[in-house]
Image: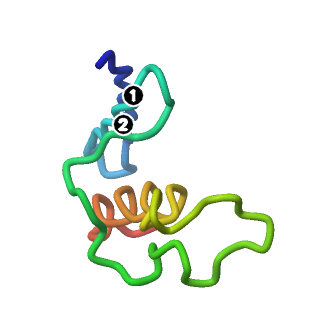
Amino acid sequence: MAEIKITYRFHFSEGRTREHDVVLDADTGRQIAGAARSPYAWTDLEYKKCRHCPLKKDDHPECPVAFNLAIVANAFKTETS
């Protein structure tokens, strides 16, 4: 499987730098994550599912957007916004 890696580099006012990598499947564009499931209940596909969402829980136990957001939120949970 071919991958696309995007590295985001954050520079903080006190001089710190922090990097966050996002790895995507080159064929599907879906994020490849280390965790198979999110520990957060709000990423479950049926939790406040969008009316127009075509995804089925059997194929996507978690909302892909919520799952990807959870990865970033978890990585930066100790940072001040």
- Identify which amino acid the numbered label 2 is placed on: Val
Residue displayed at 72% across by 72% down: 50
| Residue 15 horizontal side relative to residue 72, left or right | left
| Residue 65 horizontal side relative to residue 6, left or right | right
- Identify which amino acid the numbered label 1 is placed on: Asp
Where is residue 4, by image quadrant? top left
Q: Name the residue under label 1.
A: 25
User: Which residue is more in the foreground, 40 or 21?
Assistant: 40
Decide: is 3 above or below 14.
above
For the residues marked 2 and 1, what is the alpha-carbon distance in whole angstroms? 10 Å
The extreme top residue here reads 2
Could you tell me how many numbered marks the image carries? 2
Decide: is 45 above or below 32.
below
Residue displayed at 70% across by 59% down: 54
| Residue 5 horizontal side relative to residue 48, left or right | left
Question: Could you say where residue 46 lies in the image, as x and y percent from the top left?
Answer: 55, 79
Question: Could you say where residue 7 lies in the image, as x and y percent from the top left?
Answer: 35, 29
| Residue 66 horizontal side relative to residue 6, left or right | right
Question: Could you say where residue 68 lies in the image, as x and y percent from the top left?
Answer: 44, 54
Dot 1 surroundings within 10 Å: few (below 14), some, or many (20 or more)? some
**Given contact means CB atoms under 8 Å apart, are the residues at marks 2 and 1 in contact?**
no
Q: Tell me the number on the disc at residue 76.
A: none
Secondary structure at badge 1 equals strand
Question: Could you say where residue 59 lies in the image, as x and y percent from the top left?
Answer: 46, 57
In what quadrant of the picture does the N terminus appear? Answer: top left
Residue displayed at 40% across by 65% down: 70
Secondary structure at badge 2 equals strand
Q: Name the residue under label 2.
A: 22
The extreme front residue here reads 58
